[in-house]
Amino acid sequence: MSAPARVTPSVAETTSKTPRGTLYRGNEGMWSWVLHRITGVAIFFFLLVHVLDTALIRVAPDAYDAVIGTYKNPIMGIGEVALVGAIVYHAFNGLRIIAVDLWPWATRHQRQLWWGVLAVWAVTLIGFSARHLPNVFSHMGGGR
């Protein structure tokens, strides 16, 4: 006579350090996904505002000039750095996603590819900030 088939899983099979369905929680896969969505939504809202304020030039050129005038301050300059950061991350991570979808080797190395995306993103953003921020803050303090 054989042993009866076990219907319920053992305690070792049901208890794990990671709850079911949370394979990527807290790891690179989750953070790349979250940041890709956040940057995509941020870029969408920027484009929406950009189209609306650019459309003002046809309706009311004086209102357009007033709106553009409000953008010429250091806070908006820092916002431009954030915008470029979002665009650059979204672009590089999108290329990583394409590589993971197309090539099997990229699937095996997607964690390293994400860290590569962050490294290239940081270098690009540092280079942009070094060129952009001096122009933003050069108009402060009176003078010309």
Image: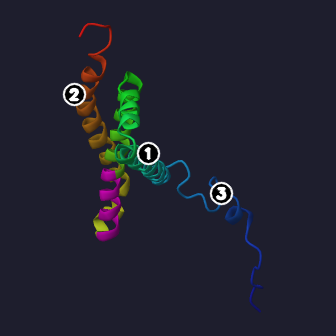
Residue 115 in sight: no
Where is residue 74? Give x, y as percent: 37, 22
Mark nearer the N terminus (3 vs 2) = 3
Where is residue 75? Give x, y as percent: 41, 25
**Residue interval drawn in magenta:** 91-102
- Please report contact status of discs 1 and 3: CB closer than 8 Å, yes or no: no
Figure quadrant of the N terminus: bottom right
Give the alpha-carbon distance from disc 1 to disc 2, as whole Å.
Answer: 25 Å
Looking at numbered disc 2 in the image, what kind of residue is underneath it? Arg
Circle number at residue 131:
2
What residue did someone put label 3 on?
A: 19
Give the alpha-carbon distance from disc 3 to disc 2, as whole Å.
Answer: 46 Å
> In the depicted view, which residue is nearer to us: 85 or 62?
62
**What residue is drawn where x is 52% and y is 56%?**
24
Q: Above or below — where is 57 with respect to 1?
A: above
**What residue is drawn where x is 28% and y is 24%?**
133
Looking at numbered disc 3 in the image, what kind of residue is underneath it? Pro
Looking at numbered disc 1 in the image, what kind of residue is underneath it? Val
Q: Secondary structure at mark 3?
A: loop
Q: Secondary structure at mark 1?
A: helix
Circle number at residue 49:
1
